[in-house]
Image (tube, rainbow, N blue to C red):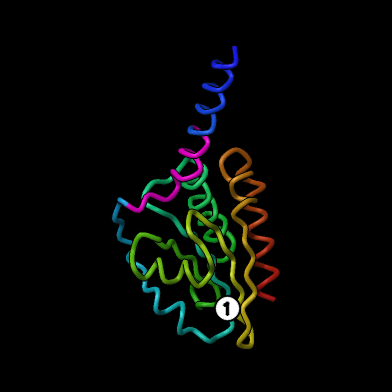
Amino acid sequence: MKYFIKCSFITSMLLFLFFAFSCSDKNKNRVTGQNINEIERSTANHVEVIYFHGGIRCAACVAMEKFGRQAIDSVFSKELQNGSLVFRSIDLMEPEGEKLGDKYEVASSSFLIIGFKDGEETVTDMTAFGFRNAKDNRNVFKQGVIDEVNRLLK
């Protein structure tokens, strides 16, 4: 019986570790097509929604990007056009993405909303909220993103 419990525990831990690290696979190269230097040199007051990802993405990771982008596109078309709001999908496996990930202390899939106002940055980490809601409660996730963007745009 003890042997069975040990094997079950070890198997559970291995599955947990596999899932925990499946969202960022450093063996895959993905191209983002994003101009990351634009993010770093920008000084104007604006809000950036940044979805960081690795090479392999779980269903919740994909949902965060998809429904976060939908929320932004559906409510903030004017702000997207005039540049006061930007949505970025950044691949952490690219050198530029890794550099930006280091700046925000991000090593795996993450969803950040960053307000730039008068030279100050306000970073809201929506990652845990996204993992809880994006896949199964997409409307809750979308509304949370909309509310936080509105707060930071003021």
Occupied quadrant, residue 72: bottom right
Q: Position of residue 154 (x, y in %)?
A: 70, 76
Instruction: Write the residue at 67% across / 68% down.
Output: 150
The three-letter amino acid code for the residue at tag 1 is: His
Q: Position of residue 58 (x, y in %)?
A: 46, 42
- Which residue was labeled with disc 1? 46
Tell which of 118 and 91 is nearer to you. Answer: 91
How many residues crowd around disc 1 within 10 Å: few (fewer than 14), some, or many (20 or more)?
many
Which residue is most to the front? Answer: 2
Q: Indicate whether 37 appears above or below 130.
A: below
Q: Is residue 60 left or right of residue 137?
A: left
Instruction: Write the residue at 47% across / 69% down.
Output: 102
Q: Position of residue 111 (x, y in %)?
A: 55, 58
Q: Indicate whether 152 appears above or below 125.
A: below
Mark count = 1
Q: Position of residue 68 (x, y in %)?
A: 54, 55
Tell which of 44 and 125 is nearer to you. Answer: 125
Where the N terminus falls, by quadrant? top right
Which residue is most to the top? Answer: 1
Instruction: Write the residue at 57% across / 78% down.
Output: 46
Instruction: Write the residue at 43% across / 61% down.
Output: 89
Magenta residues, as a range? 15-26
Q: Indicate whether 1 appears above or below 52.
A: above
Occupied quadrant, residue 125: bottom right
Secondary element type, mark 1 = strand
Q: Is residue 19 magenta?
A: yes
Q: Indicate whether 9 appears above or below 110.
A: above
Q: Is residue 136 magenta?
A: no
Q: Is residue 73 left or right of residue 95?
A: right
